[in-house]
Amino acid sequence: MQPVAGKLGDAGDPGGAAAVLAHLETILRSRTFSGAWRQQRLLRFLVDKYVQGLAGELKEYSLGVEVFDKGEAFDPRLDPIVRVEVGRLRARLEKYYETEGRKEQIRISLPKGSYVPRIVRCVDGGTAEATPPTQYPAKVDGSRAFRGPKWWIWAAAAALAALGWAAFRLASSAGGQRSPAAYEFSRLTREAGRCSFPSVGPDGRRWLYACLERGQWDLFARSAGTELGVNLTADCAADDWQPAISPDGSQVVFRSERDGGGIFLMPSAGGPVRKLASFGYHPCWAPDGRHVVFSSGTFFEPEDGPARRASELFTADAKTGELRRITSAAVVYDAVQPSWSPHGHRIAFWASSPDGRRDIWTIPAPGSATREAVATPVTQDAWVDWSPHWSPDGRFLYFTSDRDGSMNIWQVPIDEQTGRVLGSATPLRTPSAYSTHFSMARDGRSFVYTRRSISSILYVAPFRPFQAVDASVAKPLTGRGRQVREPEFSPDGAWLAARVQDPEEDIVILRPDGSQLRRLTNDRAKDRNARWSPAGDYLVFLSDRGGRFEYWAVNPDGSGLRRVAPSMALVWDSAKNLVGFPAGSEPLCVLAFSRPCPAVSLPADFAPISFAPDGRLVAGRLRSAPAPREQLYVLSLADGTLHKIAEHGWSPVWLKDSQNLLFWETNAIWAIRADGRNRRMVLGLPGQILQQRFALSPDQQFIYFVRTEIEEDIWLAREHGTGQTGNMLGQLR
């Protein structure tokens, strides 16, 4: 590249300061940057410094203090907010130039390992790089040797900060809402594997968590003044995870895969293990320590949780193991990850509705003054809201949400007795793009949480029917730092459709070699599960852009966006007609390929997913099956014979012979005959996450699958002024 003639400060330079700043304003007004206030502020600061010739001042410390208002005590070694936000800004800029800004002549990027922006502009079909203006030494005289803001600005800022801190302490002493700026953050776990699910003991001096190391989850305990945790379940070869310490600190309840799986109890310091229930996930103690609440279902990630999971909540007597179901479809369709309020009045949980929404709810706890089990919504919106946790005084409900563009922790004031929401949700904004699994110390001055980093990478590997896939020769098609999921081949094999999440969920198409990625949607709507029409002239996908999840269609060039049908079982039949199968109603022809368009007659109880190539068999589910309704069946259209394929089967893909199919179950891809015989594993990734959706190339010579890489550590948020004394969370750094 040849530098642009002149410097950015030269007014006559067409690629200089004026053009760059005008381009900056265009970016900040774009749909891609809409609502992304942190990235807007950061980008403006970086470009302004660059144009002024002050690129040498772009250091991590200065960005933390001047852009993110961290104060002079900011320590980049403990607080990664600058690195996190710069990474998010880099991804958002890439997204902008892939879509709205693809025709822009000026390009701004952030090279990895640097905070100085790189600015280039197109010159005669190529690119030329702009040279930042030179910074000349400032003249210093005896009366003004201090460079920077005037002394009175610093004095005013200090006064305002003091007033702000005093106001915060007053609110805190009155039991008011915590300010995000009132915490300092530090990393606690440094184990080699993933560490998550923290649970703080009642005295704040001991806490438990789970770590995934060498392909196995184990429970660890850590006390004040120690650097590493003690493995409490090292003698068990099965996974042990999702721990919760009892209110008196003497016991821990957890999910384990030992002895057929379920909910188990043991002393919090380790020791004999007792089975409490033969099923269940995400256990949580009642405040009196006599009962445990848990959900019958679980999830890998909240965005991908089955929309028809239909999990229920149960309580168990901690001594006798007596079980009681406390939710059902009559109360709320789905319920997972419960949290019992501190005074025992209500139980919070999150639910995945049939139309794909993820919201927070509460119900009266068993034995509370309210006898009728009516679910009360806490959130009712298009965001992914999950992982609820009560504040120690019961005045706030914390939860994880992506409502500001990143997955972070939010708090909402609530009436613990009635579940009535008393105000708007506000963010804590931890220094992470993904924070969840919140646990607060009893004094309310510190909390721990899981900081997560996710990459979903698309791979391709040779495929031969009835043979295991050699994952060691699989080739990655997309890079780390981006989530690409749900691959789907076009009928001619020229394109793959997929969903990207960065952080918005959009539909893209890309070549089978991973090149030429193009966005078909680019907005705040959640767009998922794209499928090609049999002719390849449009795609159908689920979207909440109309206020609820419905099916929409779009052309391969991104044009022709239109609503198609409400959420229901929707498939292409063997005649290439798009047919809907609403529950309790007759099937209907949504989009006709052939004329006339007769809808295939299926049993009313059967919800189809995929027809075999010859049209004689169809894979699907029974609506009357017991919760969570994940059983996969194959139905013969000739005689109505049903064959059960899997207990928890997803994503059925037919082989060309119409007699065998592939499906996903328990983190592996399996092959099986249509009559349920000759089941065998095709692809497994021990210790790794294999996404449910996969695809075969049209000639069925290659399999495309998605492997998700997750890094997790546990972090501490400590109220300013807590110091090195007091509870354990005040001592660990």
Image (spheres, helix red, strand yellow):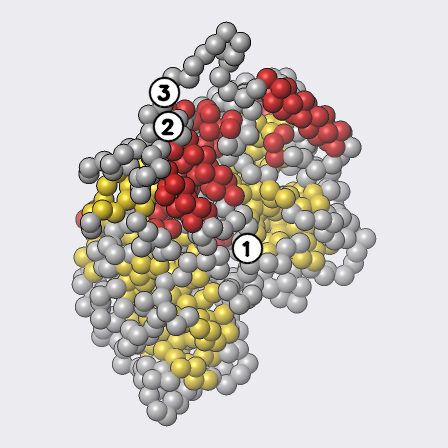
Q: N-terminal of the two: label 2 or label 3? A: 2
How many C-alpha atoms fall within 10 Å of the one at disc 3: few (<14), some, or many (≥20)? few
Mark 1 surroundings within 10 Å by alpha-carbon count, few (fewer than 14), some (14 through 19), many (20 or more): many
* Residue 142 on image: x %, y %: 50, 7
Does residue 633 appear to the left or right of 111 in the view shown?
A: right
Residue beneath disc 2: 53
Q: Which residue is drawn at 38% across and 55% down?
A: 100
Task: Kindly report which numbered mark, 2 or 3, lies closer to the viewer in this rendering.
Answer: 3
Q: Closer to the camera: disc 2 or disc 1? A: 2
Callout 2 amino acid: Gly
The residue beneath circle 3 is: 136
User: In the structure shown, which secondary structural element does the residue marked by tag 3 occupy?
Assistant: loop
Q: Mark 1 points at which residue?
A: 383
Identify which amino acid the numbered label 1 is placed on. Answer: Trp
Residue at coordinates 63% horizontally, 27% vertically from top-left? 719
Name the front one of labels 3 and 1: 3
